[in-house]
Amino acid sequence: LKYQMEEQARHSAFIRQKKAQEEAEMKRREEEEHKLKLLEAEAEKLEQEEERRATTIQQQERKRNRELKQKQYSMALQEYQLLVAKKQQWSEYSAWYNEEVKRLNKIHKERINEAQQEI
């Protein structure tokens, strides 16, 4: 009987120890799962931040490209306006020059006519 009681006590102690080990193992697993969930949440957060950063960089690049194209357009427009102004000046000068040539030719012909009449 004493042996049976000791055996039963050992068996009960073994079962309590086994149960305590299983509970400790379950608790460890739950903690690992919790840590894993935290890490997954952190990874998701980092991924979203990276996507946001990439989107911001793309937006900045598009803005810079737009500004560059606007500057290029503005410079091309100024260059065109300058060429138009120079062409206008040249046209005005050319018209004045042609009128001046006609006037001088007319004076020259009149002098020739006067000289011929005197002769």
Image (tube, rainbow, N blue to C red):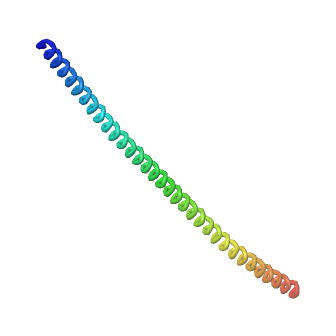
Tell me where residue 84 appears, x and y as whole percent.
65, 70
Left or right placement of residue 1 versus residue 82 in this view: left
**Number of numbered discs present?**
0
Residue 57 higher or lower than 75, as above or below? above
Which image quadrant: the N terminus? Answer: top left
Left or right placement of residue 54 versus residue 11 in this view: right
Residue 12 higher or lower than 66, as above or below? above
The residue positioned 20% from the left and 18% from the top of the image is 11
Give the residue at the far left of this rendering: 2
* Relative depth, front residue between 61 and 17: 17
The quadrant in which residue 31 appears is top left
* Relative depth, front residue between 55 and 20: 20
Tell me where residue 15 appears, x and y as whole percent.
22, 22
The residue positioned 26% from the left and 33% from the top of the image is 27
The quadrant in which residue 95 appears is bottom right
* Relative depth, front residue between 13 and 21: 13
Left or right placement of residue 79 versus residue 104 in this view: left
Left or right placement of residue 96 versus residue 66 in this view: right
Which image quadrant: the C terminus? Answer: bottom right
